[in-house]
Image: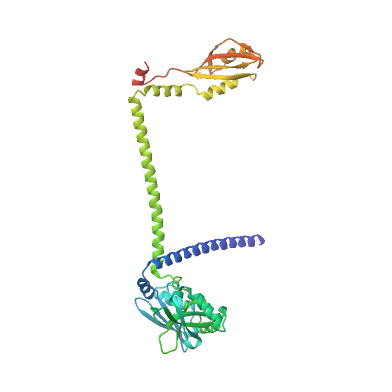
Amino acid sequence: MLTRKRTVIAMTEVSVARSDSFHALAARWRDFSRWWISQLREAVPARWLSWVDDDVIPRLLIWRDRDLAVCRLTSVADTVETRFPLHRFGPTELNGWLAENGLRREQVIIGPVIGRDLFFLRDLSVPKAALPALPKILDQEVLRRTPFQLSEIWHASIPITDGSADIVTMCHWIIRKDRADAALAELGLTASDVDFLAASDGNSEAALVIAFRTRGEVDPPWARRAVKLLAAAGLGAVMFGLVTFEWCQASVATGIEASLIEAREGAQDRGGSSQAARLFAIKADAGILEIWDELSRVLPDHTFLTETHIADGRVTISGFSADAAHLVRIIDQSPLFAGATLAAAITPDATEHKDRFSISFKVRGARTVQLPGSARSSAS
């Protein structure tokens, strides 16, 4: 039993590790897609963005009507409304109803409608040049001019004027988190289930006042399609690059091969048959490494060479030996060499205290090469 438990634990750890890796990869892809969408938004005209944001992203409002939870889904095509018994309403029922309408949770922004009386409202004027720093300005307003702490509330601002003047008048909406959580609990929801808070006094249309996630974080369907198209285009570009590289390399190889064939034919036309004959002869003769290997095998340890000359199947060696007179017989006994003779007289050397010698012999494997056609006539 102990072994089986350990196995299950190990498998669980592996599964958790794989899951963490998958989530990390998904988070990186999500961050990249959001960055790409934000850059795309900066390049798209503001009129297009307002049309996209207002019409493409379906918006779901939820509010309480006595013992019922009312859901109103507004999209480009239509507005759909349904009601659930409040005691049976929650995220599961909400996701099921969205699926019936052909949508997933991540394709919709969801917000509850909360009574206006639960909010603390303030009016403030902000210079138009300071609007990029508006979040910091609002935080300072909360800390300096209200009794709230930032960790206790949710807050945001809604422009009242159209912003054409140098000073923009705004309405600062503030709600305590415990009040908002209580209002969400009445609908069977939590803050993690919604994307924004809407406010209404019962006589007017609900207005979005506090967004938990910015529009850039709520990816519309067109943005997801654009990201997928970007990924497909990147993959296609990589494949096209590989094919182009392979084609270029094949073209270069073909050109080199054609140049070699042309050079070979030109060499034959310019009397290159003698060069080809030498190549055939070198290939036919015993190799230099083979000659060296045989010399190192047959020569005694007290003998060393100072000069070696190999040409046309004949080898001439010079050096010093303690018994130079017997080297001719030793070389003649080799199966690779024949016809060993002294090329010069043996002379004693006072410095090395050995005999200086010079011996010439032939390589048994050397032979005259039979040349074809024009090569034979040129050699003759």
Residue 206, image quadrant: bottom left
- Which of the two residues, 5 or 10, is positioned nearer the viewer here? 10
Query: Which residue of the protein is positioned furthest toward the front in this rendering?
Result: 166
Q: Position of residue 158 (x, y in %)?
A: 44, 80
Which residue appears at 47% of the width and 21% of the height?
A: 285
Which residue appears at 59% of the width and 62% of the height?
A: 13
Which residue appears at 39% of the width and 69% of the height?
A: 221
- Which of the two residues, 333 or 211, is positioned nearer the viewer here? 211
Q: Position of residue 39 (x, y in %)?
A: 42, 65
Q: Is residue 296 left or right of residue 260?
A: right
| Position of the N terminus by quadrant | bottom right
| Position of the C terminus by quadrant | top left
Total marks placed: 0
**Does residue 118 lie above or below 236 as drawn?**
below
- Which of the two residues, 1 or 314, is positioned nearer the viewer here? 314
Q: Is residue 95 left or right of residue 346?
A: left
